Image (cartoon, helix red, strand yellow):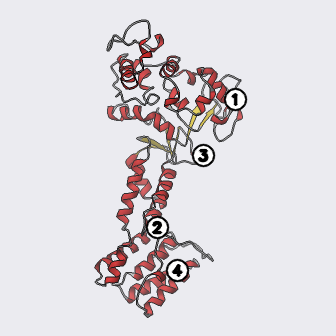
Amino acid sequence: MLKDVLPKPRRSSSISSGRQTRSEMQFPSSPASLLIKRSRTRATKGLWEEAIQDANEEVKADPSSPWGYEATHVVLHGAKQYDEAIEAFKSMLHRMDQSHDPATTQLRKNYISPPDVIAAIDSIVSEICCPLVVIDVTTGCLCNDTGRMRIFKADTRFKGLVSSMTKKVDRTEIRHVVERFFGYVMFSHAWFGHNWAWSYMCCIDKSASSVLNQSLTSMYKWYANSAATLVFLAGVAHPPKPGDLSRSLWMARTWTLQELLSPNVIFFYDSGWKPYFGNTGVSHKQSPGIMQERADAIKIPSGTIVTFFPDNLGVREKLRLASTRNAKFDEDVAYSLIGIFTSDIRPHYGEGSDALGHLLEEIVARNGEVTVLAWSGNSSSCNSCLPASIFRL
């Protein structure tokens, strides 16, 4: 049942603490039980070939007994042969379900079936906030959530979870594995140690309105939940000069405002793909010099940028920040602020400047923020009390 190549013997081996050991179970003394004890002993020493032979002998001696399959599962799990280990565990449960022995029936209640563990894993995966489509950095291909889940379930980390959780679902351990596997960077390269990356340039199917809308409304959270955001400053020469970041085109675009504020970890790279001013720290948010350049560019305290969350800036200040940036479409002014305002407006390209009116209407209705009514210039076509442009606020 083992593959041709097995791990080399070790003097010790950690077997999942989630399983009840054979010695803890109540089973009748028999010649076959001695095989199981020996299999256990050999498994703790990493003698996988010998351990599986003993377990197989137990199964042959009494095919209807669950304990030979239980021993087989222990050995295969220890040898990291997770597919075979899960099948052995299923066989064990099947024998226990068919048993008429009251003690075995009672023991069966202590175990969790693999489908139940998988259901728990699925539920935790569904809680993780990830972009709809990402780049598989090992292949360079785009991958949707269905594809990522298929890859995850073929991975040894997933199989190891299913094989190890035989008596208790450890949601903390599941979440640790899931978050590590599905962790992504925003526009990364393979040398950053993550499986996935996201870029608005190629990961949004703009021909599908539902995908586009969900992407626009979720983008702020995706940046916030990313392992890191990488910013490539094509217009900043290498080596850069002081102030190049604050004068860069990136600092003037509408959509990059949320990229500036939302991520916990961010790195800037000049046109030579070198860290901005050679800073190789854990995050450029921890660089006082770089943060001061950003603060000078948008005229808010650098500390506010480092610890930004939607409630630590006032409504007019957020709108002022947006007013300093260039938008390709009128709607972008409003849609790029959805996450920054935790807004519920639904994007609909084609509404033009009315998008801003809808955003401001929601702000007034939800927060009672009447300062947005102090404006000059043209009125919004959707509400005459509101401005047509934030540049007049």
Secondary structure of the residue carrying numbered label 1 = helix
Q: Distance between the residues labelled 3 and 2?
A: 31 Å
Which label's residue is closer to the chain start, 3 or 2? 2
| Location of residue 265 with respect to 171 vertically, above or below | above
**Disc assigned to residue 289:** 1
Q: Mark 4 points at which residue?
A: 49
Quick check: can you spot residue 2? no
Q: Name the residue under label 3.
A: 191
| Location of residue 366 with respect to 178 vertically, above or below | above
Which label's residue is closer to the chain start, 3 or 4? 4
- Badge 1 crowding class, 10 Å Cα cut-off, few under 14, some 14 to 19, many 20 or more, is some
- Badge 4 crowding class, 10 Å Cα cut-off, few under 14, some 14 to 19, many 20 or more, is many
Amino acid type assigned to the residue bearing label 3 in the image: Trp
Place of residue 319 in the rendered image (x, y in percent of width and height, measured from the top left)? 48, 19
Q: Who is closer to the viewer here, 323 or 308?
A: 308
Judge depth for marks 2 and 4 and give the one in front: 2
Which label's residue is closer to the chain start, 1 or 3? 3
Q: Who is closer to the viewer here, 49 or 139?
A: 49
Q: Name the residue rendered at 30%, 77% in the picture.
A: 97
Q: Who is closer to the viewer here, 10 or 234?
A: 10
Q: Who is closer to the viewer here, 147 or 340?
A: 340
Judge depth for marks 1 and 3 and give the one in front: 1
Secondary structure of the residue carrying numbered label 4 = helix
